[in-house]
Image (cartoon, coloured by chain):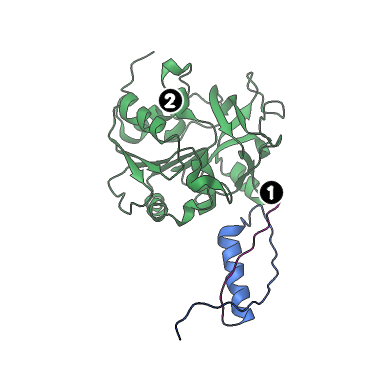
């Protein structure tokens, strides 16, 4: 399973993600410059966090016109895996691979913190290494992470079980208190209908190396690897 | 929250300019999922630098 990490001018979590897939997972990984137009060698495309093209107009807005994004859409149409983290999630909503939008946090401030996150379903490769209802802790770092969608879209997301992650309290209660940025339905991460395209605001790559103080995030990558390829988990128990 | 954006564009007539602006707004300047937009159109005559 080969990973590609998209690099826009302004991406800043690209190397963190590549470190996880290349070094911790020991899987072939390459950084994909935004001008590239051939990504057919990749099994998983990851759009990392950062500020694509500066995000001056609106988060993720310019990325839709980049040469590589047309290929990412093709990649997704072929049923291959796409993961958007933070800015990557914003980009996926802007290009229409995921519904809704990410707007300014409820408190209008950039939030750099850790949040408890509830894993809502575990029957997809992305979350197969977690247990149902598991409460994990992941770093978040965003100014525009408040998930918004109209009522019909939210209902469709709920009906189709497309919400994989919700912000919650450390006890696992999904309520306003556990909702750091004011996301509707406490949404922290959603997938498309096929379950192959995942977008999430929390940073699993920042909770993967034990030296950083948490390893709840690496299970996302390990689960994907194990479920999609049957490959065993390369990371030794820590 | 809002944005105010001024831009110059060339078009043969007003209808064409409006179509162009709608497209620019829908695809780039505004995200219709979360934003509305409106625009005012003002005609200016700009020298385009064509050689005589």
Q: Colour of chain A?
A: green
Q: Residue at 45% across / 38% down in the picture?
A: A48
Looking at the picture, does residue A236 appear above or below residue A192?
Answer: above
| Chain letter for the residue marked with disc 2 in the picture | A
How many numbered marks have been drawn onto this rendered protein structure? 2
Q: In terms of secondary structure, what is the magenta stretch mainly?
A: loop
Res. A96 in view: no
Question: Residue A195: percent from the left, percent from the top?
Answer: 47, 42
Nearer-the-camera pick, A228 or B13? B13
Q: Do callouts 1 and 2 point to residues on the same chain?
A: yes
Q: Circle 1 sits in a helix, a strand or a loop, which is it?
A: helix
**Chain letter for the part of the structure drawn in blue:** B
Q: Circle 2 sits in a helix, a strand or a loop, which is it?
A: helix
Task: Give the CA separation, mark 1 to mark 2.
Answer: 32 Å
Q: Residues within 10 Å of mark 1 (few under 14, many from 20)?
A: few
The residue that mark 1 highlights is A151
Q: Residues within 10 Å of mark 2 (few under 14, many from 20)?
A: many
Q: Residue at 66% across / 28% down in the picture?
A: A174
Q: Which mark is residue A219?
A: 2
Which residues are the magenta region?
B2-11
- The disc, 1 or 2, on the residue closer to the chain's N-terminal end is 1
Left or right: where A74 falls relative to B6: left
Q: Residue at 71% across / 26% down in the picture?
A: A177
Question: Residue B26: percent from the left, percent from the top?
Answer: 59, 62
Nearer-the-camera pick, A210 or A156? A210
Check the image and name the residue furthest to the bottom.
B52
Question: Residue A96: percent from the left, percent from the top?
Answer: 52, 53
Looking at the picture, does residue A238 appear above or below residue B23?
Answer: above
Question: Residue A104: percent from the left, percent from the top?
Answer: 66, 41
């Amino acid at each position: 399973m080969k990973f590609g990490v998209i690099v826009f001018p302004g991406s800043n979590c690209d190397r963190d993600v590549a470190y996880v897939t290349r070094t911790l997972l020991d899987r072939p990984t390459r950084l994909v410059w935004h001008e590239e137009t051939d990504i057919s060698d990749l099994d998983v495309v990851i759009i990392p966090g950062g500020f694509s093209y500066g995000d001056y107009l609106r988060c993720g807005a310019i990325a839709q016109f980049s040469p590589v994004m047309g290929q990412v859409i093709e990649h997704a149409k072929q049923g291959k895996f796409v993961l958007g983290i933070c800015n990557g999630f914003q980009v996926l909503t802007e290009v229409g691979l995921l519904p809704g939008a990410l707007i300014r946090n409820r408190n209008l401030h950039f939030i750099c913190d850790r949040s408890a996150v509830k894993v809502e379903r575990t029957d997809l490769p992305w979350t197969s290494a977690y247990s149902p209802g598991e409460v994990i802790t992941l770093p978040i770092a965003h100014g525009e992470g408040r998930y918004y969608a109209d009522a019909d879209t939210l209902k469709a997301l709920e009906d189709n079980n497309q919400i994989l992650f919700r912000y919650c309290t450390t006890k696992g209660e999904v309520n306003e208190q556990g909702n750091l940025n004011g996301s509707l339905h406490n949404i922290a991460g959603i997938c498309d209908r096929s379950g192959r395209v995942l977008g999430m605001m929390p940073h699993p790559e920042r909770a993967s190396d034990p030296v950083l103080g948490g390893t709840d995030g690496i299970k996302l990558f390990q689960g994907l690897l194990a479920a999609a390829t049957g490959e065993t988990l390369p990371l030794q128990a820590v | 929250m809002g944005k105010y954006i001024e831009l110059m564009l060339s078009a043969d007539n007003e209808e064409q300019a409006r179509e162009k602006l709608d497209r620019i707004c829908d695809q780039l300047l505004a995200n219709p999922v979360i934003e509305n937009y409106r625009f005012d159109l003002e005609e200016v005559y700009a020298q385009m630098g064509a050689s005589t």
